[in-house]
Each structure stands twice: as C-alpha cells, then as structure tokens.
Image: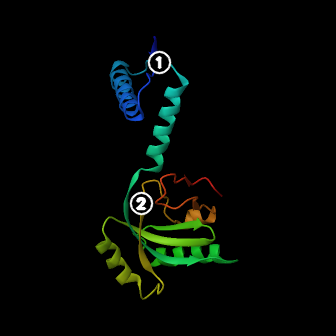
C-alpha cells in the first residue's frame, strides 16, 4: 500500500512555519507508526514545496548541534606548537589512568589543543573535581561551556585512530558548527 501526502506552505512568518512543521511531522509520524503491522512494507510519498524540506533540514540540523546543556568542565591542558597534539593526548591518557570514570575530551580550536574533563551541571561539582585533580594538573581550571550529548570522550582505543573533535567557532556562537568527522 502506498500513501501520498501533499503539503503546501502558506505565506506565514517563521514562528508559524515552525509550529506548522512540528504539527505536520507529529501528524504524519504518530498515525503512520501505529498503522503498519510487523513485516508490512508500507511506503509514504511526501509531495511538498522545496521550502518544506529546507525548513525540515534546518530544524533537524539545529536539533543535532544544539542537543545538550550549559554546564562546566575542568580544563587540564592547553597548548599550541609542534608537539601540542601529542601533549594533549598524553594529558588525556594521564587523566584517564587516574580517573577512569570521568570523561576527558581532546579538542582543537586554532591554534590550541585542549583537554577538558567532566560533564557538570553545576559549578560546585566542577570545583570539587578541580580541588581533587589540582595536585596532578597544576594549570587546571574550570570553564563554562555547552555540553553536547554528541561529544565523544577520550578513549585509549580511539586515540590510536587519531579521532579528534574540532570546534570551528566559539561555543557560545549561535552558528556553531561541530564536526566530529575531521581526521
């Protein structure tokens, strides 16, 4: 069985378009999920103006890059130069050996490699970790930043694959682009 859905966006301002888009998505996803039986191969064709798919793509991209919360991490390393990348991985590994239950994140924001640890909702929790690690990481301090649910923590296995997260713009910038595919 094949269903065809025709969509047409009216000349509305962006708030109404977002609400309309959400209602349309909920209207199609919820009923269709309950109508298919196990093993059925039902197909739905959506015929809509190109603007509809453009808005949908923007909404999905925004949701991916803004999934998280403002929180705190403790920065234990920051350096630029010839051996800063290796130094960042060495610092992350040293931290991982001392605190295997706390995630560490190696990032590059030109021209510095940084290692930040933890995912804390409150400053008090970040300060508690800072007090515990200050004897091993003298230059450490806490930072307030956006904690993304897609941040990939340091792992000795991933380090061998040279996986690194790149922040293209400031984390507080509304046009933040987060790219985990850079190698």
Say whether residue 107 is left or right of residue 70: right
Badge nearest the viewer, 2 or 1: 2
Q: Is residue 42 visible?
A: no
Residue located 46% across and 38% down the image? 59
Is 113 in front, or is 157? 113
Check the image and report above or below for 116 versus 37: below
Across and down, in percent, residue 138 comes to: 47, 87
- Does dot 1 land on a helix, a strand or a loop? strand
Tell me if mark 2 has few (under 14), some (14-19) or many (20+) residues whose alpha carbon lies within 10 angstroms of its own: many
In the rendered image, the quadrant that contains the N terminus is top left
Across and down, in percent, residue 87 comes to: 61, 78
Check the image and report above or below for 2 versus 62: above
- Does dot 2 land on a helix, a strand or a loop? strand
Across and down, in percent, residue 139 comes to: 48, 84
Check the image and report above or below for 25 versus 6: below
Is 56 in front, or is 127? 56
Tell me if mark 1 has few (under 14), some (14-19) or many (20+) residues whose alpha carbon lies within 10 angstroms of its own: few
Q: How many marks?
A: 2
Q: Is residue 176 visible?
A: yes
Pointer 1: what residue? 44
Which mark identifies residue 179? Answer: none
Residue located 46% across and 19% down the image? 8
Sooner in the amino-acid sequence: mark 2 or mark 1: 1
Pointer 2: what residue? 147
């Amino acid at each position: 069985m094949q269903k065809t859905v025709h969509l047409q966006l009216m000349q509305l301002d962006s708030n109404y378009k977002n609400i309309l888009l959400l209602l349309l998505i909920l209207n199609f996803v919820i009923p269709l999920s309950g109508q298919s039986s196990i093993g059925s191969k039902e197909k739905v064709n959506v015929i809509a103006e190109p603007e509809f798919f453009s808005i949908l793509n923007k909404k999905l991209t925004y949701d991916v890059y803004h999934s998280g919360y403002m929180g705190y991490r403790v920065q234990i390393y920051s350096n630029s130069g010839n051996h800063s990348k290796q130094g960042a991985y060495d610092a992350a590994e040293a931290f991982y050996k001392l605190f295997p239950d706390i995630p560490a994140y190696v990032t590059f924001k030109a021209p510095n490699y940084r290692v930040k640890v933890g995912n804390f909702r409150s400053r008090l929790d970040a300060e508690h970790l800072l007090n515990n690690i200050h004897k091993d990481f003298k230059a450490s301090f806490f930072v307030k930043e956006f904690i993304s649910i897609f941040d990939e923590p340091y792992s000795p296995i991933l380090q061998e694959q040279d996986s690194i997260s790149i922040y293209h713009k400031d984390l507080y910038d509304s046009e933040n682009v987060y790219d985990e595919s850079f190698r």
